[in-house]
Image (cartoon, rainbow, N blue to C red):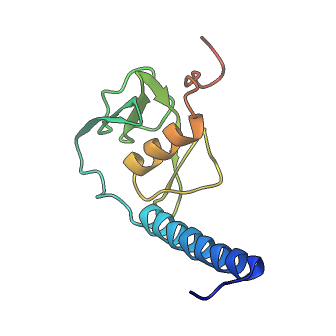
Amino acid sequence: MKKITRRQALGTTAGALTVLGLTAAAGATNAAATPSEPTTPGTVDEVYKGRRIQITAGGGGHHGGHHSPGQPTVRIDGRELHIMRNADGTWISVINHYETFSDPKLLARAAVRDLQGAALVPFGGAA
């Protein structure tokens, strides 16, 4: 049986851990880069990471919201998430103005992640 030095063992271990780390990072990047199916017009009602996301199609019948007529209403745990549509058709939210999303459902899921369990406070800070 051939003996290896401590340096060789540590080098081999470090190399293996680097490969595992890069593989995991690549998998996470691919998962994050793969968008879910776009929200179809109508209603979305799902639980994502323990939070209830509800999206209703926009229309003239929206009462008390902060957005334009025809824009969808997004709620997280029953509280409205203020969203805005950019000129290029992408969406941003009051939670994160720096990242755009192609779809309100993807935007709502990102808001849930960004909230990290915190409650969504009504826009304007009112209780």
Q: Quadrant of the C terminus?
A: top right
For the view shown, which residue lies furthest in the front direction? Answer: 1
For the view shown, which residue lies furthest in the top direction? Answer: 127
Decide if residue 84 is on the left or right side of residue 62: right
> Where on the picture, by quarter, is residue 47?
top left
Residue 35 in picture, x, y percent from top left: 38, 62
Residue 61 in picture, x, y percent from top left: 30, 27
The residue lying at 43 percent from left, 59 percent from top is 102
For the view shown, which residue lies furthest in the bottom direction? Answer: 2
Q: Is residue 85 above or below residue 95?
A: below
The residue lying at 64 percent from left, 48 percent from top is 97
> Where on the picture, by quarter, is residue 50?
top left
**Figure label count:** 0
Q: As rendered, which of 115 and 68 lies closer to the eye?
A: 115
Residue 5 in picture, x, y percent from top left: 74, 82
Q: As rendered, which of 76 and 55 lies closer to the eye?
A: 76
Q: As rendered, which of 18 and 14 lies closer to the eye?
A: 14
Q: Quadrant of the N terminus?
A: bottom right
Decide if residue 101 is on the left or right side of residue 50: right
> Where on the picture, by quarter, is residue 118?
top right
Q: As rendered, which of 35 and 79 lies closer to the eye?
A: 35
Residue 25 in picture, x, y percent from top left: 55, 67
The residue lying at 45 percent from left, 42 percent from top is 108
The residue lying at 77 percent from left, 79 percent from top is 7
